[in-house]
Image (cartoon, helix red, strand yellow):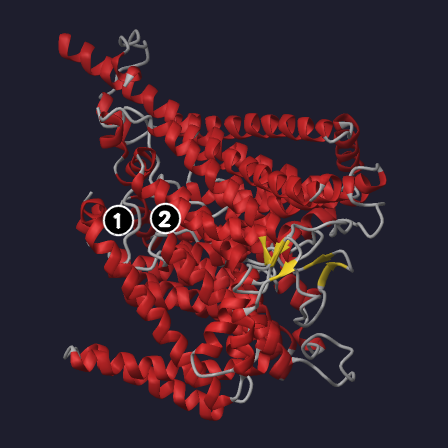
Amino acid sequence: MTATLAAPTARLTRLQRLGLLALTLTAVMSVTRLTTGYDNLTSSGTIGAALRLTVPILLAGLAGLWAERVGILNIGIEGMMILGTWFGAYGAWQFGPWAGLALAVLGGMLGGLIHAVATIRFNIDQVISGVVMNLFAFFGVRYLSELVFVGQPQGGISQSPPQSSAIPRIDIPFLAGGSIGGWQSPDVLGWLEERGWFLLGDIGGVGKGLLANLSLASLIAVLLVPTSAWILWRTTFGLRLRSSGESPESAESLGVNVIAVRYLGVLISGGFAGLGGGFLAIVSSSYYRQGQTAGRGFIGLATMIFGNWRPSGVLAGAAVFGYSEGLKLVAGGSITGLFLFIAIVAGLAAGVAAMLRSTRRTSVAAIVAGVAVLAFLTVDEVPESLTQALPYVVTLVVLATASQRLRPPARAGVPYRPGGAH
Amino acid sequence: MTALDSPPTAPDTSPSRNPLDRILTPSRATALRTSGITVASSLVAILIALTISAILLAATGKNPIDAYTTIIETGASGNKLLEMLKRATPLIFSATAVAIGFKMNIFNIGVEGQYLFAALIAAEVGSRLDLPPIVHVAAIIAVAMLAGAAWASIAAVLKVGKNVHEVISTIMLNYIALSVIQWLFENFFRDDSDGGLNVKTTLLPDSGRMPDLVSGRLNAMFLVALATVIAFWVVVYRSRFGFRLRASGFNATAAATAGIDARRMTVTALLLSGAVAGLVAMPSVLGEAFAYGPNATPIQFGFAGIAVALLGRNHPAGIVVAAMLFGFLDSTSAELQLAQVPNSIVKVIQAVIVLTVVIVNEATIRRLNIRTAERARAELATGGAS
C-alpha cells in the first residue's frame, strides 16, 4: 500500500505538523482564556473530566472502526456498550474492578458474537441486526437486573449495588507530582498551571489534567488507539482484516479466510464496545445504572465517520466531544468562551486560505468567524438541551459538506458469501 | 456454487408452461404457495424463538414452562383482548411508517424522533386552536402528520441533496429531535399555570379529544390505525404511485429507465413515512394524556415499530398480526410479574422473535431461489432435448 511505502519520510513530517497544530490551538485557547478570564478553559480539572468523558466515546468509535474495516456495519454498538455496563458492574461488584472490566469486554463480545452470527453466517441486513441488538441489550440487562440486583443493598431493576473498590489512579512522577517509593516528586505541570502564564500555563493545565489522577483504565484505552492503528495498518493480520472490508473476493482469492476474519473483527468490535460500557460503570461511576450509555454508542459511530475510519481521527473526534462535555460539567458558564476560540481559529484559517488564494475557503472561514464573534458578543448562556445535540449536528454537517473527502471501507455493509465471485 | 452444480432434479409432471414465463409471472397458485411458505416459515421462526427464549429463561434459573403457561392462560382468559388492541395501536402506526420506507428500500430509523417531535407540536398547536369537535381532532391529526413529515424531510433533503445515507442521518436526527423537543418544551410550550407541578403542555380542550370506543380501555385511534393500514395497502399495492414506489425500491436503475425518478420517490417515501410516524403518539395525546409531556408521552415506539414491520414482512396484514402479537405479549407483563417472572422477558422474547424471523426468512428466500434456479435449469435442459 502506498501509505506504508511512503511512511518513513511522511510520518515524521506528519508528527511535526500535528505538534505544530496542537501548539497553535493551545496558543489560541490561551489567548481566549486570558481575554475572557475563563481560567477553566484549560484547567487541569476540565481536562481531567474531558479525558474521562472522551474514553467511552473513543472506545465506541474504535468498536465501529474494527467492525466496518472488516466489512460489517455495527449499529448495535450502543447495545453492546449496554451489555458492557451491566456485566462490568456485575463483575466489579462481585470480583473487583479489573475482573469487572474483563467481564465487560466479554459481555460486549457476546453481543458481537450474536451480531456476527446473524450478519456473517446468516447474511441478514446488518442494520437490522444492529437495531435488534440495541433492543435486545436494553431489555436483556433489565431482565438480568431484576434477577440479580433487586433485593441487594442499593440495588434495583435499574441500578446495581455500588462497587467497593476502584481501578487505581496514578500521578506521573516529575510532571504531575507522582511519588516514587514514598518520595514526592516535583509537580512541574501543576506549578506552571498555577502561574497562569501565556501558553505555558495552558500547557501545564492540559498536561496535568491528562497525567495527574490518571486512571489506569483511561491509559489502557488511549493506548488502544495506536495499537489499533498498528495492527490494522502495519501487520499482515491487519491487511487481511482491511482487505475483507475493501474487496473480500480478492482477499479470498489470495487465501484469506474472509469469514473467519470478519468474525474476528466483529468480536473485537464487541469487545471494544463492552470495554467502553465497562469504563462507564466502573471508572466514570461505581455502579450500573439504566441508560448509562446515553447514546454514546451512536456518538462513537459519528466520530468514526468524520474520523474518516481511522483511529487517529476517532481519537480527535472523541476528544472534541469529550472536551465540550467536560467543560460543560466543570464550568458550564465558560462554554461561551469557545465561541471566541472558534472565531480566532476560523479567522486564522481564513488568513491561511487567503494566502493559498482559495476564495471559497476564505469566504467560508470568514463567515464562520463572523458568526462565532457575533455569538460570543450576544449569547450569554447556551441552553443545556441544545448543546447535547452538538455531536449529532456536527456529524450531519460533516457528512453533508465533506463527504467527498471521507473514504469508508468499500464493502462495509455488503453481505458476502464465500465463493461468490466464482 | 454447489447448488447450481448439482445434477438436475427429475422434471415434475405438472402441466408444462413456458418455464421462463413461470419464473417471471408467478401464477395464482405460485403466489399462494409463496405466501403459504411465508406464513409457515414465520411460524417455524417463532417456535425457534420461543425455544431460544426458554433456554434463556432456564439458564437464568426461571422455569420456562411456568412463564409460557402464564402467557397462554392470560391469552385464553380473553380479558386481555382490549388491552392487546390498545397496545397494538401505536405499533401499527409505527410499523406502517417503517414499512413505507422499506418499500422504497429506505430504512427509516428516525420514526422515534419524528413521532415525538410531532407529538409536541400537535399537542401545543391543538391546545391553542378553537374549533368545533370533529374538525378540531382532524386538525390536530393533520398537524401531527405535517410535523412528522417536516422532521423526516431533513433526512430526505440530506439524502437527495447531499447523498447522506438515511440510516446515519435518521439516527443522528433522533437525538437532535430529543434536544430540540426538550428545549422547545422547557422554554416555550410547558404549561406553568400549576406552579410548575404540571410537566405537560396545556391540556387539549374537550373538542380536541378523541373519544373512547370502550370507555377507558380502547380509544377510537385504533380505528384510525386500521384505516391507515388499509390506506397503506391501497396506495402501495393497488395504485400507480405504489407500483412506481416498489419498482424504484426494488431496482432504482431499472425503474429509472422506465422514467421513474428515484430521487423523487425517495423524498415522497420519506415524507409519507414521517407523516404516518407523526401519528404514533396520537393515541396518547388525543385519547389519554390530552397533552405532550416528557413523562406522559410514551417513548421507544419507533424502534418497536421496526421490529413489528420486520416481523410483519412490511405487509399490511402482517403488520396488523405482528402488532397484535406484540401487543398481546406486552399485555401479559402484570401476570408474569405475579408469577415471579421478570416482565422484561417479554421484550427479550420479542427481540429474539424478530431476529429469528429475519434469519429464517433470509434462509428461506435463499433456498427458494436456489430451487427455482434448479428447476428452471432442469426444465430448460429437457425442453432443449425434445
Q: Residue at x 39, y 27 (%)?
A: A260
The location of residue A163, given as percent across then percent down, is: 75, 49
Q: Nearer the viewer, residue A277 or B371?
A: A277
Question: What is the spatial separation of the Cα atoms under label 2 and label 1, in whole angstroms?
Answer: 9 Å
The location of residue B382, given as percent across then percent down, is: 20, 10
Whether the residues at callouts 2 and 1 have beta carbons within 8 Å, the answer is yes
The relative height of residue A368 versus residue B162 in the rendered view (above or below) is below
In the rendered image, is residue B272 in sight? no
Mark 1, secondary structure of its residue: helix
Q: Which residue is mark 2?
A: B105
Please name the amino acid that badge 1 sits on: Ala
Mark 2, secondary structure of its residue: loop
Please name the amino acid that badge 2 sits on: Asn
Q: Which residue is mark 1?
A: B252
The relative height of residue B371 versus residue B87 in the rendered view (above or below) is above
Mark 1 residue crowding within 10 angstroms, few (<14) / some (14–19) / many (20+): many
The relative height of residue B170 versus residue A203 in the rendered view (above or below) is above
Q: Quadrant of residue B58?
A: top right
The location of residue A47, given as percent across then percent down, is: 53, 69
Q: Is residue B154 left or right of residue B210?
A: left
Q: Is residue B307 left or right of residue A370?
A: right
